[in-house]
Image: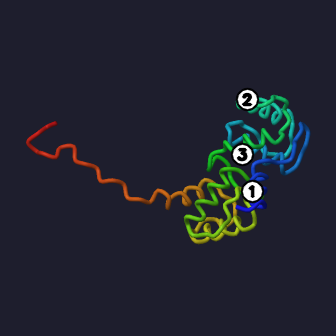
Amino acid sequence: MNGNSDRRIATAFTGPVLYPWDAGSAVAELQELLQAHGFPLRIDGDFGSVTETAVRLYQKRHKLIVDGVVGPKTWLSLKMNVKPGDRPLEQGDSGTDVLELQGLLQVHGYPVERNGIFDEFTQQAVVAFQQKHHLKACGIVNALTWGVLGEKRHSAPAPKQKLWFSNPRKWW
């Protein structure tokens, strides 16, 4: 990898420093990540008291400095520990779940860069995948799209079950 790719991957796991009472798309992504980690938040893009409480609890659970501010270490922890399929993905998102998405798209033959950033090329591949599989071609990776993406990975035939009674004269 070159230095430029390394920097893009590093930025995939961070975000802008967010403070309580901030608002915008970065706050909405924070709320999606917190929701994916089990916090029942409304995703409205406003860093209010409920979001601040969730951030503080997350920081405490993950042994981070508990200050309610979402800095590089909190972003890194949120994005490194999110499981694929726990949140819908769309252009602009980043994290390990996006890395997994890009890897699955590669398995399905789509030439996307695996950098952890849901960029324009990832979105184009997602839309093409959704069209090919007769899904709603919206570019958002929801649970249904995740399920179909994962089918090829698990498509090896299951091992044949051995019979319980291989000899009809024996009961054991």
Which residue is located at x 77 percent, y 33 percent? 54
Residue 16 x/y as whole percent: 86, 47
Q: How many marks?
A: 3
Q: Secondary structure at mark 2?
A: loop
Residue 56 x/y as whole percent: 79, 30
Residue under label 2, please give it: 63
Q: Secondary structure at mark 3?
A: helix
Mark number displayed over residue 79:
3
Residue that protrudes farthest toward the right in the picture: 21
What colouring method underlies this structural image?
rainbow
Mark 3 Cα-neighbour bin, 10 Å: few <14, some 14–19, many ≥20: many
Q: Secondary structure at mark 1?
A: helix
| C-alpha gap between disc 1 and disc 3 | 16 Å
Mark number displayed over residue 110:
none
Q: Nearer the viewer, mark 1 or mark 3?
A: 1
Amino acid type assigned to the residue bearing label 3 in the image: Lys
Mark 2 Cα-neighbour bin, 10 Å: few <14, some 14–19, many ≥20: few
Q: Quadrant of the C terminus?
A: top left
| C-alpha gap between disc 2 and disc 1 | 27 Å
Mark 1 Cα-neighbour bin, 10 Å: few <14, some 14–19, many ≥20: few
Which residue is located at x 88 percent, y 49 percent? 24
Q: Earlier in the sequence, mark 2 or mark 3?
A: 2
